[in-house]
Image (cartoon, helix red, strand yellow):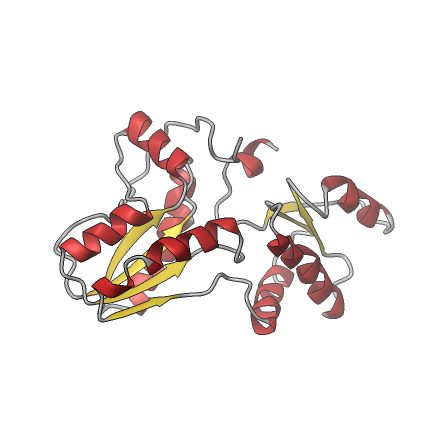
């Protein structure tokens, strides 16, 4: 079962599904996995979308989620309708969008990212311009920028989700970048892959730490962060 596929707290925030029509000819579609934790969705995905809307005021900001399980949960439980990727693309076509930029909030180019790209490519002929952005961790410069952000926090153990995809290599690579930056007391683990929690414990116990903090290395802090 996926991390966010179970029921979540029914608490609602003032979430904007960003699925309105009258888009105009220029659209920025922000694609996320999604989460059924409403307050968290507002403070993470919602915050990213709002920041991008401020940075690109000439574009209409729209949302798409890749997890149909999440979409079904929030629609059934809360009556909140959010577009999946195909619905968002159909909406763009129906509204006469000519210039479409798609930016995912994925951490890596794993299964979700590649499935999204394949789906988007089916629509390329409907737009004069179509561009798909890269995931967060795509270049050495990306790793160093994220490492700087992680180093600035007080957490020691950064917990990623983990994946069976070959892209899981981003986690040990992030560990390497942190170590090369001289941050010997920063560690990167995963909930569902490698490095595992057991691997993390071995690394941490090699030091003389009296206090260990965990911080999610995920776009949203959903079921894994709240329960696992």
Q: Quadrant of residue 17?
A: top left
Q: Nearer the viewer, residue 12 or 33?
A: 33
Q: Nearer the viewer, residue 108 or 143?
A: 108
Q: Nearer the viewer, residue 156 or 139?
A: 139
Q: Which residue occupies 40% across, 57% down?
A: 117
Q: Which residue occupies 28% across, 41% down?
A: 82
Q: Say left or right for 91 vs 190.
A: left
Which x, y percent locates residue 93? Answer: 18, 57
Q: Say left or right for 226 vs 104.
A: right
Which x, y percent locates residue 72? Answer: 34, 31
Which x, y percent locates residue 137? Answer: 55, 63
Q: Nearer the viewer, residue 25 or 218?
A: 25
Screen quadrant of the C terminus: top right
Q: Which residue occupies 34% across, 57% down?
A: 120
Q: Quadrant of residue 79?
A: top left
Q: Which residue occupies 40% across, 50% down?
A: 32
Q: Quadrant of residue 185?
A: bottom right
Q: Say left or right for 207 vs 117.
A: right
Q: Is residue 141 above or below residue 51?
A: below
């Amino acid at each position: 079962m996926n991390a966010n596929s179970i029921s979540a707290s029914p608490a609602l925030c003032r979430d904007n599904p960003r699925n309105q029509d009258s888009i105009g000819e220029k659209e920025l579609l922000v694609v996320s996995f999604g989460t059924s934790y409403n307050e968290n969705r507002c403070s993470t995905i919602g915050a990213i979308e709002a920041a991008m809307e401020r940075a690109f005021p000439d574009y209409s900001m729209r949302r798409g989620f890749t997890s149909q399980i999440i979409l079904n949960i929030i629609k059934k439980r809360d009556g909140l309708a959010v577009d999946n990727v195909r619905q968002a693309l159909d909406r763009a076509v129906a509204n006469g969008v000519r210039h479409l930029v798609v930016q995912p909030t994925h951490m890596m180019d794993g299964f979700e990212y590649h499935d999204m790209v394949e789906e988007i490519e089916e629509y390329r002929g409907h737009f004069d311009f179509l561009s798909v952005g890269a995931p967060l961790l795509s270049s050495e410069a990306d790793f160093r920028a994220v490492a700087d952000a992680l180093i600035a926090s007080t957490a020691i153990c950064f917990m990623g989700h983990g994946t069976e995809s070959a892209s899981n290599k981003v986690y040990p690579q992030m560990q390497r970048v942190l170590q090369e930056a001289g941050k010997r007391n920063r560690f990167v683990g995963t909930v569902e892959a490698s490095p595992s929690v057991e691997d993390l414990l071995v690394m941490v116990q090699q030091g003389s730490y009296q206090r260990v903090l965990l911080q999610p290395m995920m776009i949203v802090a959903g079921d894994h962060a709240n329960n696992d």
